[in-house]
Amino acid sequence: MQITQQMFESYLHCPLKCFRYRDGSPGQVPGYSEWQRQIQHEYEQLAWTRLCTSFAPNKTFWGNPAPADLQSHRYTLIGQYRISTADFEASLNAIQLIDLNVRGHHRETYAPLRFVVREKLSNADRLCLAFDALVLSSACGHVPHLGKIIHGQNQQVVTIRLDKLIAKVRHTISRIRQHDARNSPPPLILNRHCHECDFQLRCRAIGRGRDAHSIGRPARGGATGVGHASTAVSRGIDGKGSRATRQRARLCRCQRQHC
């Protein structure tokens, strides 16, 4: 099974969602989620444009350069680099040539970059960067030890050591493959991610049906487990909506600053 970037990131939020994507199940993108994706896309374009100003034009490349140019390190910065192998598929925001000092020996290698519109990074952001590094190793021949995330209105650059994160990524990939080998997707669990998920309507319908036929003990407050989760999700939608508005405003201010 080929594990895509989308499947890996989805597994971090909801293991079942990962297998919905694997099976090509149709979903319905919520308005909030579509808005967030548009904000993220605009931020990626803005971050790439600003980053390119730090390098000579002949040292940047958009897309996949020729393999010989990649091996010879012709370009210092490469944007939207796509990798597809039998095991993995990913589209990296960017990769940058960096100089590493390994036991007193200097070596140039490409490191993954991710652009994240949010002001505060999550553990999932760091794990996705490590996944990018693992996929990048299939093209470069070795796993990068460092990666960078550019995030927030001020486009702060955070350098992250990847060794421990890559170990966690390998463990997560192993769990995904175990489910795939058994042909048994993870169980349905409603959580805070549901309000922005493409499959929220489908999962909630299944959850309500399961709850209607169960004789389980009610959760605190007299609600069932699913009902309690749905209430939490509803509260999350209200909170996330206001956060999305603030993110949009920050992006607009950022665009004005760097025009």
Image (spheres, rainbow, N blue to C red):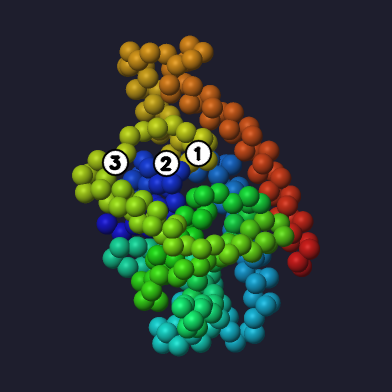
> Is label 2 in contact with label 1 (beta carbons under 8 Å)?
yes
Residue that label 1 marks: 193
- Check disc 1 and give the amino acid type: His
Q: Is residue 237 left or right of residue 256?
A: left
Q: Is residue 112 left or right of residue 51?
A: left
Residue 14 screen position, x and y as percent: 42, 41
User: Could you tell me if residue 33 is visible in this image?
Assistant: yes
Q: Assign a secondary structure to mark 3.
A: loop
Residue in the image at 25% along x and 40% along y: 184
In the rendered image, which quarter contains the N terminus?
bottom left
Comes first in the chain, label 3 or label 2: 2
Between residues 31 and 196, which one lies in front from this camera angle?
Answer: 196
Marks 3 and 1 sit apart, C-alpha to C-alpha, by: 18 Å
Residue in the image at 37% along x and 19% along y: 211
Marks 2 and 1 sit apart, C-alpha to C-alpha, by: 7 Å
Residue in the image at 46% along x and 78% along y: 103
Q: Residue furthest left?
A: 182
Residue 14 tag number? 2
Comes first in the chain, label 2 or label 1: 2
Q: Is residue 162 left or right of residue 182?
A: right
> Badge 1: how crowded within 10 Å, few (<14), some, or many (20+)?
some
Residue 119 screen position, x and y as percent: 66, 51
- Check disc 3 and give the amino acid type: Pro
Between residues 199 and 148, which one lies in front from this camera angle?
Answer: 148
Residue 99 tag number? none
Comes first in the chain, label 3 or label 1: 3
Residue in the image at 45% along x and 57% along y: 165
Residue that label 3 marks: 185
> Badge 2: how crowded within 10 Å, few (<14), some, or many (20+)?
many
Q: Assign a secondary structure to mark 2.
A: loop
> Is label 3 in contact with label 2 (beta carbons under 8 Å)?
no
Residue 158 drawn above or below residue 30: below
